[in-house]
Amino acid sequence: MGQTITEKIFSAHVGRDVYAGEIIESPIDMVIGNDITTPISIKAFEDSGVEKLANPDGFSIVMDHFIPAKDIASANQAKISRDFAYKHDLKHFFDEKDMGIEHALLPEKGLVVPGDVIIGADSHTCTHGALGAFATGMGSTDLSFAMITGGNWFKVPEAIKVVFSGKPAKHIYGKDLILEVIRMIGVDGALYKTLEFTGDTISHLGMADRFSLCNMAIEAGAKNGIVGVDDITKEFLSDKTLAREPKEFYSDDDANYVQTLHIDVASLEPVIAYPHLPSNGKPVSQAVADDLEVDQVFIGSCTNGRIEDLRMAAKILDGKRVSRKTRLIITPATQKISLQAQKEGLVEIFINAGAVFSNPTCGACLGGYMGILGKGERCISTTNRNFIGRMGDRSSEIYLANSAVAAASAVAGKIVDPR
């Protein structure tokens, strides 16, 4: 019987053929923690009495949510991870000196490679499936089990095949494709399943778009999102010192899927997810008709904080000014992206346009800091969630969109079509 990519990755790790529905114990190639979730894992690890990590080179801590610390509580929270990293002389510990949002930083560092099994105590760990790896989020105590044993238990997920066809039109990106998927099947339409992204459209998507696709698989309830390795993947990896030898897996023609979705990308408009669910997607033409003024625009996060997003935003903002009553915050996903944006003159464009250009952080995305919304404020954001209270006051509204829509809306002071 044929297998999906996900089934083949687990089979290679377990040492026998496995299929959807089976409960397995698999070794893990990379365990990812951050400054919010890792302290809980550390406590469970230390309470167990174990003194050494099972696979120290397969464990990374990325300080990305509240760094630099926003208050005393976040400073003390961060200190727990720092002390642990220094005690165990962690090779892959990323703090202010080499900071970035975990789901952008680890691929940039070559720490995620095709064929891996990756877990992280962050729901958007599924981002790494863009590299042909199995990647999923788990709880902090699940993370500690992997720290202790080097592996974890999984139920091999059933798969939904998403077939994208056609070349994306101008200002249609991976963000629009995944918002359309979520609109079609809902926030629980792929519950504990793999979303496997296929079709001729994939060859038109760069890695930034693929990361966006897989990043928001969790917003449909999926266990993981995944894209098969191709020349674009290999080009992305070509200049990196990889932590492991890549292993390429491809689904068999007779692999079993519980559902197949067909999406004609050529006919898509930019998709806007209205409050208060990522599944509440509507075409940008409706948002324009609704005449939605915005108080804040946010461009960044693990979904859309890559250099491609910043370049697109700068192209739209060049020579223009942000609307008088609108705030624009732009956050690069890593320090390397920040430096590249400076070298290309993008930061100057942003500041001249009236934007705030910040350090890499998850802060605004989760309503942590550096972009909190007040009562009744409306924000258009390139992040991945628009739940009630996600970015601030519970009466605020979040509209999700791609970076081009966000940048154009900052200039107009309301949601507009960048085309």
Image (spheres, rainbow, N blue to C red):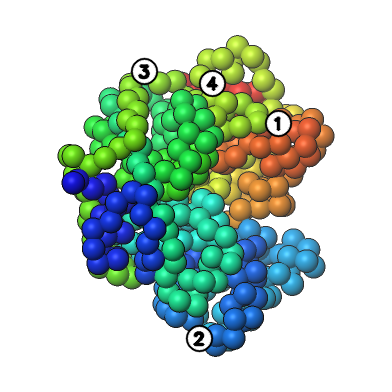
| Residue 302 x %, y % | 52, 49
Q: Which label's residue is closer to the chain start, 1 or 2?
A: 2
Res. 364 visible in picture:
yes
Marks 3 & 2, CB-CB < 8 Å contact: no
Under circle 4, the secondary element is strand
Q: CA distance from mark 4 to mark 3?
A: 14 Å
**Is residue 116 shown above or below 379?**
below
Spot the residue most to the right. 375
Give me the disc on residue 282. 4
| Residue under label 3 | 267
- Crowd class of label 2 (few under 14; some 14 to 19; many from 20; radius 10 Å): few
At x 65% / y 62%, what residue is drawn? Answer: 36
Amino acid type, residue under disc 2 in the picture? Lys
Marks 4/2: CA–CA distance: 50 Å
Residue count near mark 3 (Cα–Cα under 10 Å), binned few <14, some 14–19, many ≥20: few
Considering only order in the chain, which callout, 3 or 1, is on the residue closer to the N terminus?
A: 3
Question: Looking at the image, which is closer to me, 362 or 162?
Answer: 162
Q: Viewer-nearest of labels 1 and 2? A: 2
* Residue that appears at 41% across and 43% down: 193
Instruction: Say which element carries label 3.
Output: helix
Does the residue at mark 1 contact the one at mark 2 (Cβ under 8 Å)? no
Amino acid type indicated by mark 4? Lys
x, y percent for residue 274:
61, 26
Residue 333's x, y, as percent?
A: 52, 53
Q: Residue at x 65, y 15 (%)?
A: 291
Q: Secondary structure at mark 1?
A: strand
- Dots 4 and 1: beta carbons under 8 Å? no
Badge 4: how crowded within 10 Å, few (<14), some, or many (20+)? some
Q: CA distance from mark 4 to mark 1?
A: 15 Å
User: How far separated are the C-alphas under marks 1 and 3?
Assistant: 28 Å
Neighbourhood count class around disc 1 (C-alpha, 10 Å): few under 14, some 14–19, many 20 upward: many
- Disc 2 element: loop
